[in-house]
Amino acid sequence: MSLPERTRWPDAAALWGQASPPAALAALCDALDAVAPRLHFLGKQRIRQRLVEALASHRQRIRAFADEPALAERALPRPIVIVGPFRSGTTFLHRLLSEDSRLRWLRPWESMYAARGGGSDYLQDDERIALLERDLRHLYRHQPALAQLHPVAPHEAEECFGVLEASFSSPSFLFLAPVESYLDHLAHADEAAWSLAYAEYADQLRLVDARHGGERWLLKSPVHLWNLAALTRALPGALLVHTHREPAAAVLSLCRLIHAHHGLAMAAPDPLEAGRSAWRFYAAALPRAVAARRAGGRHLDLAFDAISRDPLAAVREVLAAAGLAPPSAETEARVRRRGATPAPSAPADTRDLASFGLRAADVRSLFDDYAAFAP
């Protein structure tokens, strides 16, 4: 279902409520407007709701910091941030580490929805839990493959890209629809723009931490590869954990994930567009990630196969690198139980890359410099 020819969808100024929306939001809305004729009604509803939630989170942060200026000084001491490429074991490692009660991690409803009212038990009674459960039912009914590609549950550790989306400068919007011109905008954004985006990200975390904090934050999203320098400026002293997997296999799995997500918004998603989105992401992100790594900081590299082979050893290595004491016996038992059933993954016959318009040799070449850090 398309809107009348002369009606822009979505309209950045109308959404923002002012004549001059941020450049990133305007670029995102332009990209969505270009693809709007191919989006079905439910897809448009879903995308609009994502944008509204991001804007609501942004405005809540402004109000909260105006009411309580001390929030701006709230410390987020040396978080652990998993930043490996998509489909390289980041979710598996994240959820293994979430078994350590010393680490505070985001539930999906904390990341994806603006705060609403809640009950006396924040982690059990928050109104966003019901919203997530409703949306997951819709998600898995319309795209059952997503339950295998990236299973989500209300009380599992989830990515933090939703927090970055409050700035509207987040490569994660590539999962909504083919937004190639928006990715081009992000690729040309300067460091000042990225510093603002990650200042918003850190302040959103401070707001969540003020509601329900923890000893150390455990965060995770491959989208951070796009700008590790801005991330580390916003979170000084963060330990960045890089997971490494054979690039062609990881990118093939990402293409499948993007294609499945695009299927939530359009009746006939184009696999070539999913392939181009994956390629554009890495063509912009990897050189920046390599440059940031060479500039210094705290980094730890883990191999996908090593994490799968000995999950507990991987957890111990991350905790040691973060300066934390070894896990307790109870934590180790929980890690062993979770590690015995790793999250399912799609088959990795890299010949299937051709259906997404990519070649394995080109993908491996794209990853050459970044893969040099692999253990």
Image: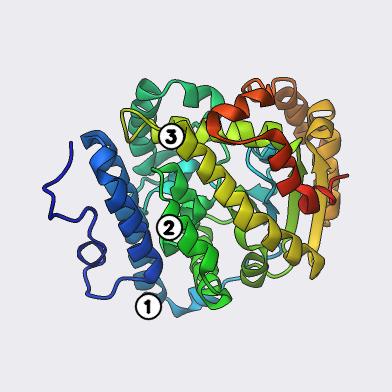
Above or below, 168 against 245 in this view is below
Q: Residue at x 80, y 47 (%)?
A: 371
Percent position of residue 333, x then y: 78, 27
Above or below, 269 against 322 in this view is above
- The disc, 3 or 2, on the residue closer to the chain's N-terminal end is 2
Percent position of residue 261, x then y: 43, 34
Percent position of residue 276, x then y: 52, 43
Q: Residue at x 42, y 76 (%)?
A: 68
Q: CA distance from mark 1 to mark 3?
A: 37 Å
Mark 2, residue position: 182
The reply to whether discs 3 and 2 touch (Cβ–Cβ < 8 Å) is no
Circle 1 packing at 10 Å, graded few (<14), some (14-19), many (20+), is few
Above or below, 142 against 88 in this view is above
Q: Is residue 110 left or right of residue 228?
A: left
Q: Nearer the viewer, residue 239 or 43?
A: 43
Percent position of residue 195, x then y: 56, 73
- Of helix, strand and loop, which one carries label 3? helix
Mark 3, residue position: 261
Q: Nearer the viewer, residue 30 or 75?
A: 30
Kind of residue indicated by mark 3: His
- Of helix, strand and loop, which one carries label 1? helix
Number of the label disc, if any, that sits on residue 361: none
Q: Quadrant of the C terminus?
A: top right
Residue 97 can be seen, yes or no = no
Q: CA distance from mark 2 to mark 1?
A: 31 Å
Kind of residue indicated by mark 1: Ala
Q: Residue at x 67, y 49 (%)?
A: 103
Q: Nearer the viewer, mark 2 or mark 1?
A: 2
Q: Nearer the viewer, mark 1 or mark 3?
A: 3
Mark 1, residue position: 66
